[in-house]
């Protein structure tokens, strides 16, 4: 992943987290579920990428 892709990945994850927190604090259950699904997918990709990097570092 090049540096620009990484920065965009981080930026989009922050946006998802921001909207998730807003939906959580305002009590919008449907939007909270929607943003949590997108945030979970993003964080899962980050976890798998980290796992792959650690595995192939050796």
Image (cartoon, helix red, strand yellow):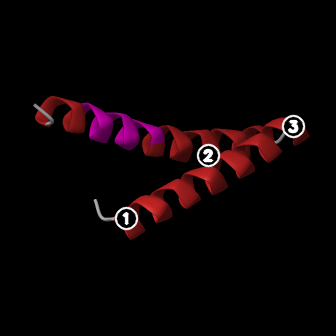
Q: Say which label, 1 or 3, has the lower sequence index.
A: 1
Task: Point out residue 18 in the picture as x, y percentages from the top left corner.
Answer: 72, 49
Give the Cα distance between marks 1 and 2.
28 Å
Q: Say which label, 2 or 3, has the lower sequence index.
A: 3
Residue at image location 71% in from the left, 44% down from the top: 20
Query: Is 28 left or right of 18, judged from the image as shown?
Result: right
* Above-or-below relation of 14 to 24: below
Q: Which mark is residue 3?
A: 1
Residue that numbered label 3 is attached to: 25
* Residues at discs 1 and 3 in contact (Cβ within 8 Å): no
Residue that numbered label 2 is attached to: 34
Query: Is 5 left or right of 31, judged from the image as shown?
Result: left
Q: Secondary structure at mark 1?
A: helix
Residue found at the very far right of the displayed protein: 26
Residues rendered magenta in the picture: 43-51
Task: Point out residue 19 in the picture as x, y percentages from the top left corner.
Answer: 73, 51
Figure quadrant of the C terminus: top left
């Amino acid at each position: 992943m090049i540096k620009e892709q990484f920065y965009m990945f981080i930026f989009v994850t922050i946006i998802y987290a921001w909207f998730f927190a807003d939906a959580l604090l305002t009590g919008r259950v449907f939007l909270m579920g929607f943003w949590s699904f997108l945030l979970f997918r993003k964080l899962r990709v980050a976890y798998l990428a980290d796992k792959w990097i650690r595995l192939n570092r050796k």
